[in-house]
Amino acid sequence: MKNASSMLSVPIGNNAHTGSRRSAFSLIELLLTISIMALLTGIAAPSIGYLADGGMTSVEAKSEAILQQALQHAVTQRTFVRVGLASYTDTASGRQSLLCVAIASTTGDLRSEEFDDEASWRQLAIPVALRGVKLDDSHIPQSSVMVSVSQSSYPAFERKSGNSSTVFSHVFQIDPQGQVTLGKSVYPREVVLPLANPQRPGNPVVISISGLTGKVRAMRKEQLIALNK
């Protein structure tokens, strides 16, 4: 199969046998180029839930993606979003893992506290699997203002998939202004997901979301060491 560049080099129209070189794209060539670029972009941008597993780099990318999605939905749709984490054992590998999901209020407020009711709290996307990691608060810098999602006082919620169900017990909330809370009137400076592979605890990643602005950032080993100094 010829690649895109070779396809675009084929002369089009009456100039096919003239041997002359044109200095600019024709309209047809331009439209063809745009179509190919759009196709390649679509192939290269899978949904969050299907990002390839690649160790802590994959975990970091998935975590940041779902938090950005939750924040954007809360602010643009002027509603409340809750993000939950659940521990589970991956059946294929036997590794301890986390499942992360975001749900949004369909009324735009906290009128309904039936968080298990999908009519009142709609799931934004399929749950994201963070394979091979667990929450490990020991990686939170001691001198920081970071508070782990494991310290949340929000109630757990349940989501069903087929004949099984998952309870998301570590929950934080994003309001329509982008502020993040771990409970009623609990406004930490930073809410964090301290993630570590139990088999390689020396290579953690801490995902932080600002309690005031919702800004998301990821910190690896070197940055965490610097914060502890």
Image (cartoon, grey):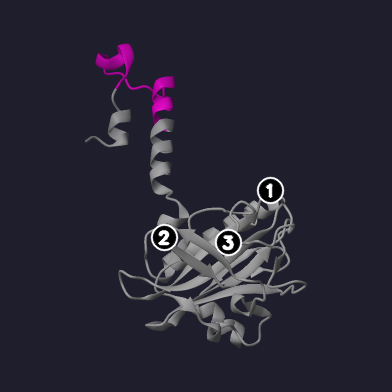
Residue at left offset 59%, top offset 61%: 116
From the image, tell me which residue sits under label 1: 77
Distance, label 3 to label 2, CA atoms, is: 27 Å
Q: Which is more toward the observer, 158 or 214?
A: 158
**Label whose residue precedes the other's in the sequence (3 or 1):** 3
Query: Residue 145 placed where, x, y %?
Result: 69, 80
Residue 99 horizontal/vertical position (percent): 47, 67
Residue at coordinates 36% horizontally, 71% vertically from top-left?
90
Quadrant assignment, res 109: bottom right
Q: From the top left corner, tell me how far across and down residue 104 is, in percent.
A: 63, 55
Q: Nearer the viewer, mark 3 or mark 2?
A: 2
The circle drawn on residue 163 is: 2
User: Which quarter of the image is occupied by the N terminus?
Assistant: top left
Identity of the amino acid at label 2?
Answer: Asn
Amino acid type indicated by mark 1: Gln
Which marked residue is nearer to the observer: mark 1 or mark 2?
2
Closest to the observer, 112 or 187: 112
Q: Nearer the viewer, residue 3 or 126?
A: 126
Task: Quarter of the image for the C terminus: give it.
Answer: bottom right
Residue 21 sits in which quadrant? Answer: top left
The magenta stretch is 11-33
Image vertical order of residue 26 relative to residue 86, above or below: above
What kind of residue is marked 3? Leu
